[in-house]
């Protein structure tokens, strides 16, 4: 099974934000929200001996994702390939996963009231296309691929060139987004945008035990309804095949 | 529940439910569709050319049911190869901006009030044709001044030339790259052009003088810059501000503003004094080395250190780095370079430095254009104006481009009625209030006009002053003249073609120009009926298929970018009068100017004031994109950079709101202070294009501060008319309206 990862090369990235706008267009993200954001770290040092770096934030598709644990409805789950997905039909918009995410990589879409976040453009991957942020990156600074493929760019950047993940000694949830560049640059990013402890609400966990079966039951009902409609349609003949 | 559930929807539901129950399911297939389909819609991809800025990147527009649903980079495009910047990705938000100009408008209220009534295109064009005929009869066609910008205005440019006015000027010259084109032409006999022929990706050392690549984004230039960085190229960033480029640089030189020529002369002093020049190249291609050597002897790094406030050792070290890396050194010529009014001389110094390093026409430096044959229609000669140009190009400003003109020269002529009265302005795709400095003068000029016409996509502030407003179709709705780019390593031709029908009653530029020509009896200059016919004629000698061009968006030709490629050509690649690179310029000497660049001190800010410097954001183009919903969300306003020490002196905190007041007492709108170590104490910095005055732009109106509004005094370059825009001094004043 694949182990998908993203690497941003901070030497090349110029913070142009093409990735953010391409992603927003790809996924109809409302203005003011984003699945990936670009920030510059505060300028450190004393004039004229200064340094700053760039942080490209997105869902890290963590190995041990706190969001999955926090999700009471089962909407957030991790696939075999490591990608953490949100099943919109199951999401109840409770926001527990937002609290749980150490990288603040999720938002609730005000139009749909559902949680949304980067999923490495999984539907593009399925049709053989790379993620929208990768193909538009003006600096060719973003690399996407399979860490289990030794020929992949991401394998080389992570295992041969020492790309780092954004982890601290206490917050280690196994992110699969890596940053290549001088250690001084990644240190600046880590200092300015460290992962925070997941806020796993005790109440949320209790709720999840109650809610999960309820939501699944509701989904089952939806499934039943659609099945009935489907068989009706088969019987009556389809009007327009719209797909 | 809707009975009409499709099979795919049903199966999708199964898959989604499955993913919910079994946490380890593979990805849901609900969103996968065969190629050419998205959701339930058939999607067509149209290859065209972006116009969110002027770089002309290749885009693919995905169109479903006549609506553009997505823009992506065109992988077939020879220059941008599928990459697209933030603005390019946000192009649909311009197309579907609810604030767009929708119908022709005729002014009903007082000029400046913005009171209009909707009229038909017939009424609008008849009105304009009768006005232009009357103006020609009464004051001569030269009394009409034309302010174009962009590819689409080229058709109207033809109309204006046929009408008989030589008075046309674009800010791309006197407010932008004019001094550079003049300086490099004086030295190499050829201008650089746009996109600049910079061999960034092959460069071993990149020298940026005020160029803030990264914040200033031209897609292919960023790709090449990043490629060079990943290959280990070194960077020298000369900038009073710690830019993104400076943060990636091996040497950041926070130079005292206005002293770049001193630094350039000291670099030449070291290169010549330490025998680090490319002597063989200079012997073969250049003349005037002896004079240059004598000229720079006194300009030691110590001399420059006192002027530039940079350490002499750093000046020496960076010069030596260039000497080591030559000829693969790119002295970036910059683009917006109208800074201090002696900018042609600074451009000359940069061109001479490039020549000393042997970088012009060499790998990793500035490469040479490769011409492409271009077809043309046989047109009658344009009428010649007995009164000549009013903007001073070729006269008052002897080296100004007669093709691009001097915008501020036209403003002056309108205000003074010298050399003759200007009675009408046609502003086409330009924003004269945001792009030409001394806007108080521009307003005064407009007030004196008999007729002001604006052709635009958005209701920018200047439409309030217009008698007639014509809504142009956006770049996604129209054909333009094909774009022929010779300044790429692989020269190419690209098309702009509609992805959808023009919205509302907006019309493409070619249609507006042709309709006007028909009304004015100037059809002879428009011997084509459709844009397809026009395209076919332009590409006729290229031996390519129009169909293939339109399918792929752009087609490339083999390039010959280096001097070695052109060594056996009959014509010398150096196109000066002497056929040599002119380190010493007899042409300047004959004009009474310095034949070798010389440092002249610029005025310092008075006590309590700071020099206003300005630049770009990667998510905005000029003052054109602030109302774009996607881009506005990323940067709705600007902030003013102020050094930590100056902020402390003034008692200002980070995030506090101030107004900027210039030495004439002109005040900006309130703007947040960004307190940072990343700027010199003697200047403040704003991103250009904010603080707009049009109520019709709902997102951009009065957001942030306008740098241009504060530029009430500029120093004009006597050689080419460029407006030196970095001589504005401002002081931050705590905003009394802030909470």
Image: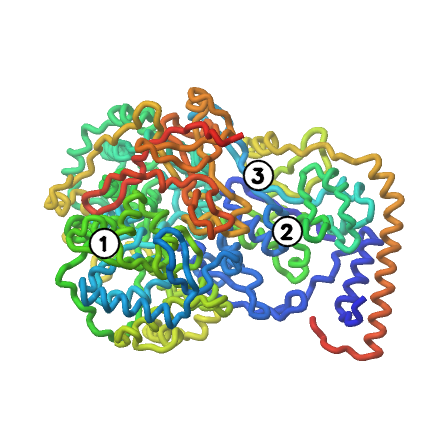
- Location of residue B632 with respect to B403 vertically, above or below: above
Label 1 – label 2 distance at C-alpha:
51 Å
Q: Residue at x 50, y 25 (%)?
A: B653
Disc 2 is placed on an element classified as strand
Residue B130 position within the rendered picture, expressed as x and y whole percent measured from the top left = 28, 69
Locate the C terminus of chain B and report the quarter of the image it occupies: top right
Disc 1 is placed on an element classified as loop
Q: Return the chain for callout 2.
A: A
| Residue matched to label 1 | B401
- Location of residue B129 with respect to B209 vertically, above or below: below
| Residue matched to label 2 | A145
Residue A224 position within the rendered picture, expressed as x and y whole percent measured from the top left = 87, 64
**Is the residue marked by circle 2 packed among few (<14), some (14-19), or many (20+) residues within 10 Å?**
some
**Is the residue marked by circle 3 packed among few (<14), some (14-19), or many (20+) residues within 10 Å?**
many
Give whichever of A55, B329 is nearer the camera: A55
Residue A149 position within the rendered picture, expressed as x and y whole percent measured from the top left = 66, 51
Residue that sits furthest to the front in the current view = B109
């Amino acid at each position: 099974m694949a182990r998908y990862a993203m690497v941003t090369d901070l030497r090349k990235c110029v913070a142009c934000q093409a990735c953010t706008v391409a992603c927003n267009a790809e996924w109809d993200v409302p203005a003011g929200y984003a699945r990936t954001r670009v920030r510059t770290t505060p300028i450190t040092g004393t004039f004229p001996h200064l340094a700053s770096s760039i942080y490209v934030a997105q869902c890290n598709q963590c190995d041990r994702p706190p969001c999955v644990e926090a999700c009471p409805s089962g909407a957030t789950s991790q696939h075999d390939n490591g990608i953490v997905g949100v099943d919109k039909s199951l999401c109840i918009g409770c926001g527990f996963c937002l609290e749980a995410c150490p990288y603040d990589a999720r938002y609730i879409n005000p139009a749909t009231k559902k949680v949304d976040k980067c999923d490495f453009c999984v539907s593009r991957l399925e049709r053989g296309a790379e993620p929208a942020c990768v193909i538009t990156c003006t600096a060719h600074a973003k690399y996407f691929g399979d860490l289990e493929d030794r020929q992949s760019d991401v394998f080389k950047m992570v295992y041969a060139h020492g790309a780092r993940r954004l982890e601290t000694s206490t917050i280690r949830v196994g992110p699969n987004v890596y940053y290549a560049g001088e250690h001084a640059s990644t240190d600046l990013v880590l200092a300015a945008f460290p992962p925070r402890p997941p806020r796993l609400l005790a109440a949320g966990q209790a709720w999840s035990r109650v809610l999960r079966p309820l939501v699944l039951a509701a989904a089952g009902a939806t499934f039943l309804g659609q099945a009935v409609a489907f068989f009706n349609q088969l019987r009556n003949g389809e009007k327009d095949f719209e797909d | 529940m809707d009975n009409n559930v499709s099979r795919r929807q049903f199966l999708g539901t199964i898959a989604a439910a499955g993913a919910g129950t079994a946490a380890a399911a593979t990805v849901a297939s609900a969103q996968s569709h065969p190629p050419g389909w998205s959701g339930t819609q058939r999607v067509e991809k149209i290859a065209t050319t972006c116009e969110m800025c002027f770089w002309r990147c290749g885009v693919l527009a995905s169109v479903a049911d006549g609506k553009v649903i997505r823009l992506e980079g065109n992988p077939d495009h020879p220059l941008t190869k599928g990459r697209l910047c933030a603005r390019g990705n946000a192009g649909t938000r311009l197309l579907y901006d609810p604030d767009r100009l929708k119908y022709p408008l005729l002014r009903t209220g007082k000029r400046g009030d913005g009171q209009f009534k909707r009229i038909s295109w017939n009424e609008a064009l008849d009105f304009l044709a009768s006005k232009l005929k009357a103006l020609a009869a009464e004051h001569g066609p030269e009394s009409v001044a034309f302010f174009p910008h962009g590819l689409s205005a080229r058709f109207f440019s033809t109309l204006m030339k046929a009408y008989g006015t030589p008075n046309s000027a674009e800010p791309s010259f006197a407010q932008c790259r004019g001094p550079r084109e003049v300086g490099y032409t004086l030295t190499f006999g050829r201008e650089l052009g746009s996109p600049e022929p910079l061999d960034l990706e092959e460069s071993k050392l990149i020298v940026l003088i005020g160029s803030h690549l990264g914040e200033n984004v031209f897609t292919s230039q960023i790709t090449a810059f990043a490629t060079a960085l990943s290959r280990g190229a070194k960077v020298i960033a000369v900038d009073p501000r710690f830019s993104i480029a400076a943060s990636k640089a091996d040497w950041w030189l926070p130079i005292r503003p206005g002293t770049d020529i001193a630094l350039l002369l000291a670099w030449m002093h070291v290169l010549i004094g330490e025998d680090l020049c490319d002597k063989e190249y200079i012997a073969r291609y250049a003349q005037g080395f002896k004079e240059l050597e004598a000229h720079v002897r006194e300009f030691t790094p110590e001399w420059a250190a006192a002027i530039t406030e940079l350490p002499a050792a750093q000046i020496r070290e960076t010069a030596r780095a260039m000497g080591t890396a030559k000829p693969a050194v790119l002295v970036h010529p910059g683009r917006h370079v109208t800074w201090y009014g002696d900018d042609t001389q600074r451009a000359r110094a940069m061109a001479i430095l490039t020549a000393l390093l042997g970088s012009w026409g060499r790998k990793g430096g500035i490469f040479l254009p490769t011409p492409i044959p271009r077809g043309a229609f046989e047109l009658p000669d344009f009428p010649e104006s007995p009164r000549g140009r009013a903007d001073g190009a070729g006269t008052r400003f002897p080296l100004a481009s007669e093709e691009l003109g001097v915008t501020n020269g036209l403003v002056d002529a309108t205000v003074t009625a010298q050399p003759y009265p200007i009675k009408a302005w046609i502003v086409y795709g330009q924003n004269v209030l945001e792009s030409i400095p001394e806007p108080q003068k521009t307003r005064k000029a407009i007030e004196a006009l008999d007729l002001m016409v604006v052709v635009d996509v958005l209701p920018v502030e200047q439409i309030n002053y217009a008698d007639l407003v014509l809504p142009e179709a956006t770049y996604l709705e129209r054909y333009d003249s094909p774009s022929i780019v010779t300044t790429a390593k692989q020269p190419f031709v690209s098309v702009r073609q509609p992805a959808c029908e023009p919205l509302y009653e907006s019309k493409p530029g070619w249609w507006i120009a042709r309709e006007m020509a028909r009304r004015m009896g100037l059809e002879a200059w428009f011997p084509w009926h459709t844009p397809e016919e026009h395209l076919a004629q332009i590409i006729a000698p290229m031996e390519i298929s129009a169909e293939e061009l339109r399918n792929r968006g752009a087609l490339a030709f083999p390039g010959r970018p280096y001097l070695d490629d052109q060594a056996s050509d009959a014509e010398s690649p150096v196109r000066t009068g002497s056929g040599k690179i002119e380190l010493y310029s007899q042409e300047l000497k004959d004009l009474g100017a310095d034949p070798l660049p010389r440092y002249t001190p610029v005025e310092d800010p008075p006590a309590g004031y700071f020099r206003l410097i300005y630049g770009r954001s990667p998510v905005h183009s000029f003052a054109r994109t602030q109302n774009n919903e996607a881009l506005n969300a990323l940067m709705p306003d600007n902030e003013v950079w102020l050094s930590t020490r100056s902020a402390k002196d003034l008692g200002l905190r980070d995030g506090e709101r101030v107004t900027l007041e210039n030495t004439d007492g002109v005040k900006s709108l309130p703007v947040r202070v960004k307190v940072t170590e990343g700027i010199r104490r003697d200047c403040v910095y704003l991103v250009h294009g904010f603080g707009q005055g049009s109520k019709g732009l709902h997102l951009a109106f009065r957001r942030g501060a306008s740098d241009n509004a504060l530029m009430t005094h500029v120093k004009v370059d006597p050689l080419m008319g460029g407006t030196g825009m970095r001589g504005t001094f401002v002081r931050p004043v705590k905003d009394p309206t802030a909470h």
